[in-house]
Amino acid sequence: MRITVVGTGYVGLVTGCCFADLGNVVTCVDVNRKKVQELQKGFIPIYEPGLEEIVKRNRNKRLYFTTDLAKAVQNSDFVFIAVNTPPGKNGEVDITHVQEAAKGIARNLNGYKIIINKSTVPIGMGDIVTQIIQKHRTKKQSFDVVSNPEFLREGSAVTDLFKPERIVIGATSRSAAQKVAEIYKPLHRPILITDLKSAEMIKYASNAFLATKISFINEIANLCDQVGADITQVVKGMSYDSRIGGQFLNAGLGFGGSCFPKDVAGLVQIGKDHQFQFRLLPQVLEINRDQRKHFLKKVHKALGSLKGKTIAVWGLSFKPDTDDMREAPSLTIVPELTAQGAKVKVYDPVAMPQAKLFLKNVKYCKNAYEAAKSADAVLVLTEWHEFIQIDFQKLKKLVRKTVIVDGRNIYDPTQMAEKGFSYYGMGRGKPFVF
């Protein structure tokens, strides 16, 4: 099939590359000329496991990158809109890029096309895109607009696209929906065909529910700290219940990234736009913000005043297996440490080039051990695998004080005590102080 993907951000790039790997001819379009030139040379602007290999297999064979929207649209049957929809000042979804993409597509229609919204957009955006194309098309070319929300997790996006738990397609035309379903047919995964607005709502409702689970378990973890219970055991006991399960019940520093914070805030604003006041979701966001403050309280409990203290920070990205710094806990925690007079040394296996754009007045280190040298405390902010496998005997010789404040609960408190470390986890009950 001949496919154009408008936008080479995270979603657009992964979608386009994977569609090419399925045997389709895919053209990825972006207005950023420098970015397109780098992609044409095989340079991948994001870190995503497996993506570089896919690009190498398909580039200049079935996968092409261009700034020429007109040619791309005219040479395709399906046009995916996968541009950025950033949050506005009040959490509203900025649809400017989607509108501009729709206008550009409309002006270059040269026959029947199916336009697919892949971007996360407000409810009713399918109708808006339809109106834009009807207004700006130069001829009465026929088209259909389809909603096909993405459910890609950073760090496992390639796997998520090839092995999705479900594929959601919303449309006013059953025929158009079925044609889009044909793209996904080789995956042999469940496909739900529904109306446009329901498909758009499914995306928001899914992310809001998962974010709610995270905030809920963090509230329980904070209570565990007060009563002396261990959140990991609580979650284990809960997860045996098939009605609950264990996914997204990992207590820690809360959710970050580009999706959960933006989509929850966006859904709250969508409610306001339709005279509906959410009571639960604003609290989900507030709990998430407060979780970083709760973590800093643990740092103070372990060290007292931070002035003059040396602190090692392990992990800067919002989650492992990505270099994405959007809404990462480190963006809140690290500046607060430096503001209180601490000397901060940081390390992340992948995200430091991105982090340098945001985090100043810190020392960037070549590995976890360099960051920990002479540190009064080691803070774990991202659960990278190499931190789990750390050599604690080596670490103990390097640090000034054997203090670990674990924002991701990657270590066992009892084992840390046995190794001679004072350990502070999230919801692990009474701190193990050596």
Image (cartoon, grey):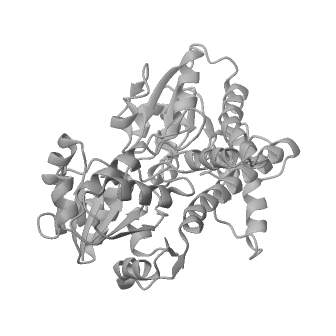
Residue drawn at 71 percent across, 49 percent down = 215
Vertical order, 353 against 148 (above or below) = above
Residue drawn at 73 percent across, 65 percent down = 236
Along the viewing direction, whichever of 339 and 325 lies nearer the viewer: 325
Left or right: 244, with 149 as reference point: right
Along the viewing direction, whichever of 353 and 95 lies nearer the viewer: 95
Along the viewing direction, whichever of 209 and 46 lies nearer the viewer: 209
**Residue furthest right in the image:** 227
Residue 425 visible in the shown view: no
Quadrant the C terminus occupies: top right
Left or right: 241, with 160 as reference point: right
Residue 395 visible in the shown view: yes
Residue drawn at 47 percent across, 39 percent down = 316
Tell me where residue 376 sits by quadrant.
top right
Along the viewing direction, whichever of 225 and 398 lies nearer the viewer: 225
Quadrant the N terminus occupies: bottom left
Tell me where residue 123 sits by quadrant.
bottom right
Vertical order, 185 against 161 (above or below) = below
- Residue 352 location (% of width, % of height): 37, 36
- Residue 74 location (% of width, % of height): 19, 64
Vertical order, 344 against 348 (above or below) = above
- Residue 183 location (% of width, % of height): 34, 78
